[in-house]
Amino acid sequence: MKILWLPATFGVTAIKPWFDYNFMPKNKIKILLVEDDSFLLGMYATKFEMENFMVVMAEDGEKAIRLAPKELPDIILLDIILPKVNGFEVLRQFKANPATANIPVILLTNLSQKDEIEQGLKMGAEDYLIKAHFMPSEVVDKIKKVLDK
Ligand SMILES: [Mg+2]
């Protein structure tokens, strides 16, 4: 029988990642979906749940700002034109809060919003999606790509 000898410095913290990857059930990817169009919200939420993602929904900017630090999602999909607080202000507050500053944000935009996309990327958004161009399955691919970075 092979005896595994570990030096004293090779403590619990050093072997913890090995346990996490091999034995712990992988946590579901949690998405905060911020979109005021109820049709799009429902369509994306259904697709994400089929992908086994956990979805938290916000229909306005105020709710998004309230939910993000509490839910700490892995990724945020953020519409720009939103009731109550617009997407830019929501993004600014996410980036200003240390709890949410490092969560990648993908902007949900319309075709006509080139300037807004530019502004959002400058403010720290990771990427953007033009809503009319993407099928829900492509959105899922994009989310996975951003999370793999
Ligand atoms: Mg909108």
Image (cartoon, rainbow, N blue to C red):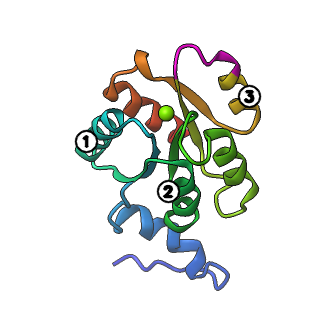
What is the distance, in whole Å, between disc 3 and disc 1 at their CAs?
30 Å
- Front-most of residues 139 and 60: 60
Q: Which amino acid does label 2 sit on?
A: Pro
Which residue is found at the position 42% from the left and 15% from the top?
Answer: 133
State the image quarter where residue 25 is shown. Answer: bottom left
| Residue type at the position of mark 1 | Thr
Graded by Cα atoms within 10 Å as few (under 14), some (14 to 19) or many (20 or more), the crowding at tag 3 reads few
| Residue that label 3 marks | 119
Distance Cα–Cα, label 1 vs label 2: 17 Å
- For mark 1, what is the residue? 46
- Number of marks in the image? 3
Picture coordinates of residue 137 (x, y %)? 32, 28
Q: Which mark is residue 73?
A: 2
The residue closer to the viewer here, 87 or 148, is 87
Magenta residues span 110-115
- The residue under the point 36% across, 52% down is 55
Q: Residues within 10 Å of mark 1 (few under 14, many from 20)?
A: some
In the picture, the quarter occupied by the N terminus is bottom left
Question: For the residue labelled by badge 2, is the local secondary structure a helix, a strand or a loop?
Answer: loop
Q: How crowded is mark 2: few (under 14 residues within 10 Å), some or many (20 or more)?
A: many
